[in-house]
Amino acid sequence: MEGVDHLADERNKAEFDVEVMKIVWAGSRHAFEVSDRIARLVASDPVFEKSNRARLSRKELFKSTLRKCAHAFKRIIELRLTEEEAGRLRHFIDQPAYVDLHWGMFVPAIKGQGTEEQQKKWLSLANKMQIIGCYAQTELGHGSNVQGLETTATFDPKTDEFVIHTPTQTASKWWPGGLGKVSTHAVVYARLITNGKDYGIHGFIVQLRSLEDHSPLPNITVGDIGTKMGNGAYNSMDNGFLMFDHVRIPRDQMLMRLSKVTRDGKYVPSDVPKQLVYGTMVYVRQAIVADASIALSRAVCIATRYSAVRRQFGAHNGGIETQVIDYKTQQNRLFPLLASAYAFRFVGEWLKWLYTDVTERLAASDFATLPEAHACTAGLKSLTTTATADAIEECRKLCGGHGYLWCSGLPELFAVYVPACTYEGDNVVLQLQVARFLMKTVAQLGSGKVPVGTTAYMGRAAHLLQCRSGVQKAEDWLNPDAVLEAFEARALRMAVTCAKNLSKFENQEQGFQELLADLVEAAIAHCQLIVVSKFIAKLEQDIGGKGVKKQLNNLCYIYALYLLHKHLGDFLSTNSITPKQASLANDQLRSLYSQVRPNAVALVDAFNYTDHYLNSVLGRYDGNVYPKLFEEAWKDPLNDSVVPDGYHEYLRPVLKQQLRTARL
């Protein structure tokens, strides 16, 4: 029935103040109020309608994206939105578009790597969108190995220009969002060659298309790479390819904050340390972690609401069937994902603080924490995106067969999200960067250098290598010290074991190659410890509101004990816990699921997502699922006619046995 809240009984069970939890989730009252206001603004604007995306052709979908972006920019100007509000507006439109790369990569690259003069020139144009930019780094033959890029930028002292060239097919730029059909400019990464010497990869601002008629400039070949996975999803984005045939650009279009080439072709490193480039990387990856919590929470919101609406089995004598969410198997699969959404949200908050801290330190020429921050953001980007992609698919399965329908919101969400596992660093490669940092930290333990930040626990190596968990009963697993010590012991012991095994090889690089799988596991253990520790740290903050702290406490320990159960082999093989203690952890986990059950729907309500943003029949706020599934079914173009097109040509002859047989 329209207007009836089918989930009202679930909401009445809540044992905490949902409005306060909304603020906790948002990060502050101000952030909540901005998000809430902008989300409703987008939901009420017919231009931002998106329920028909799956039924649009690729060309129609792309054109609708252009329309939405233009309308969004118009509204931003009309309403005089702040930078924060404009960012939320683009977020809630919820359609991958060229503006994502313009604001998310092109502008930050110029801010981070351009001189003050270059920033003044290019950012004024970019901020007004008088030029539209993309980030052209990845090539057809090289992604994660940036140092292997083949595109060249050769300085010609006769004309004071760089010659940008694509020497091979594999050197073609491939994948940049916004490149295929929209971008007028790109930050292009190429090998800088001057006076016959290759100085490695540098960034260059290159104009790609005419600002008069949008046609590609001479000697530039550019286009869209084609349809990607899923209906709608990333097919609204013009990911592109790009080739240069000796394209000339002025020397001052090399981004010269970190190094420059003089008029006579001399390569001059800047006084600004090259480590500053990592500041931009930290920014981008912390944003990806924040996005992981959002994507995961959307999937969990849909699966939780539908699990409360859906009833299956359990009826006796014609009675009402059991809500799917009451089955322990459903809780065992769903509630750890709910806990993970909150865990990723809070570690994302911490990463935002870390980025601010690193930026301030870099401005003061303090680079001490940069290696740790770089490793930390790389590892957490990998951990959270992998877990989220897997979790979205699990949420689809938790919704049964209906989860496979496009209108469930889950297939498109998965198709949009899964590229995060490879963009901005392949997830396995990123964990290997973490592993190298860990091996370096372990090697320095005896030197007197004290580990800092997220590796501070390694400073207590002597204790952690010898300690035994003191857990004796299930409730002991609610002690933050007991949980942290188990995770610290596991992470340290795995890292130390890898270091010992590496030392057996005469050639360290060969050893690293042989032990890649073990090193990845050690890096994951370290990153999981970071997330658990930041969730526990969140519990120590002063959080008001009836029952809010208790719910966060339950979610925190569900997350930690779920990881302990999932990676039990690591904990047991490192003797971090005993089999009996593992059994007690499972007992406590079951108890926590029972405590979360009456609060589950309210906990996803705290995400404060509009029905427009969720775009899911199964995840509707009012729970009115089944009539809406029929409504969506009738909208499909196949139902435009009762008798299908092609009936007379192909179906009737089969049914009437009127097919003509061909004579050989």
Image (cartoon, rainbow, N blue to C red):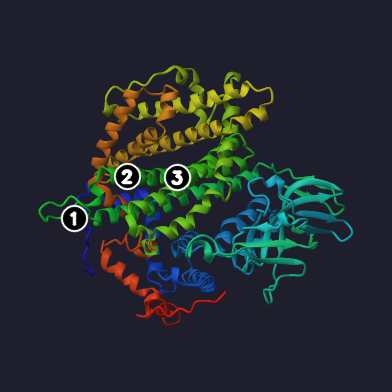
Q: Using the numbered discs, state the Cα–Cα distance from disc 3 to disc 1 in whole angstroms.
A: 31 Å
Measure the C-alpha gap from mark 2 to mark 1: 19 Å
**Residue type marked 1:** Asp
Query: Residue 6, relative to residue 52: is it above or below?
Result: above
Q: Which residue lies under the disc numbered 2?
A: 335
Residue 211, quarter of picture: bottom right
Location of residue 245 (image quadrant): bottom right
Residue mark closest to the camera, 2 vs 1: 2
| Label disc, if present, on residue 9 of the rendered structure | 1
Q: Residue furthest front?
A: 664
Q: Residues within 10 Å of mark 1 (few under 14, many from 20)?
A: few
Secondary structure at badge 2 equals helix
Amino acid on which the number 3 mark rests in the picture: Ala
Mark 3 vs 1: CB contact within 8 A: no
Count of marks overlaid on the render: 3
Question: Is residue 20 visible to the viewer in this orientation of the structure?
Answer: yes
Mark 2 or 1, nearer chain start: 1
Under tag 3, what secondary structure? helix
- Pointer 3 residue: 387
Q: Residue at x 51, y 41 (%)?
A: 354
| Amino acid at the residue labelled 2 | Phe
